[in-house]
Image (cartoon, rainbow, N blue to C red):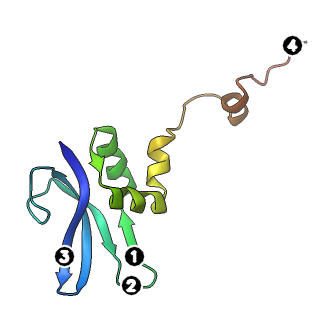
């Protein structure tokens, strides 16, 4: 199974993390498939950078984010984009009400 998780980097007592796509059988800091971004909890406020295009790609392929990565994606708004996919065609009114804008007479 492929997971999106944190990979610890940084010095002792000064952690920073890379957000990576990795096989679940690999160790925490082991080999990974692709780096999606980084997270630095030591700054105020915390620094979060995630490539939304690549993250959505991996989520659509079935990669499972860990709880912490899922929380970071919610903060960045990526998780909402994944859970509520954009529907194509029609106006906003048609999508929400199900009625087209054409009159009946």
Q: CA distance from mark 2 to mark 1?
A: 6 Å
Q: Quadrant of the C terminus?
A: top right
**Image disc number at residue 43:** 2
Where residue 88 sits, quadrant-wise, is top right
Q: Looking at the picture, how far across and down is residue 100, in whole percent?
A: 74, 22
Crowd band around label 2 with a 10 angstrom C-alpha radius: few (<14), some (14–19), many (20+): few
Crowd band around label 1 with a 10 angstrom C-alpha radius: few (<14), some (14–19), many (20+): few
Q: Going 44% across and 53% down the picture, which residue do you hit?
A: 78
Q: Going 40% across and 62% down the picture, which residue do you hit?
A: 72
Q: Which residue is mark 1?
A: 47
Q: Secondary structure at mark 2?
A: loop
Q: Secondary structure at mark 3?
A: strand
Q: Going 8% across and 62% down the picture, which residue do you hit?
A: 30
Image position of 88 (left or right of 102): left
Q: Nearer the viewer, residue 41 or 76?
A: 41
Q: CA distance from mark 3 to mark 1?
A: 14 Å
Residues tagged 3 and 1 counted as in contact (Cβ below 8 A): no
Pointer 2 or 4: first along the chain: 2
Which is closer to the viewer, label 4 or label 3?
A: 3
Q: CA distance from mark 4 to mark 3?
A: 63 Å
Which is closer to the viewer, label 1 or label 4?
A: 1
Crowd band around label 4 with a 10 angstrom C-alpha radius: few (<14), some (14–19), many (20+): few
Relative height, residue 68 to residue 104 (above, below): below
Residues tagged 2 and 4 counted as in contact (Cβ below 8 A): no
Residues tagged 2 and 1 counted as in contact (Cβ below 8 A): yes
Q: Which residue is mark 4?
A: 104
Q: Nearer the viewer, residue 24 or 55?
A: 24
Relative height, residue 7 to residue 104 (above, below): below
Q: Quadrant of the N terminus?
A: top left
Q: Secondary structure at mark 4?
A: loop
């Amino acid at each position: 199974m492929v997971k999106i998780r944190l990979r610890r980097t940084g010095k002792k007592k000064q952690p920073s993390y890379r957000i990576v796509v990795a096989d679940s059988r690999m160790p925490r800091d082991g080999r990974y498939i692709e780096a999606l971004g980084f997270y630095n909890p030591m700054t105020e406020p915390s620094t979060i950078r995630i490539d939304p295009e690549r993250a959505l790609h991996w989520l659509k392929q079935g990669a499972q984010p860990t709880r912490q990565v899922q929380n970071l994606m919610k903060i960045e708004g990526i998780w909402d984009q994944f859970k509520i996919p954009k529907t194509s065609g029609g106006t906003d009114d048609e999508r929400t009400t199900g009625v087209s804008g054409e009159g009946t007479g």
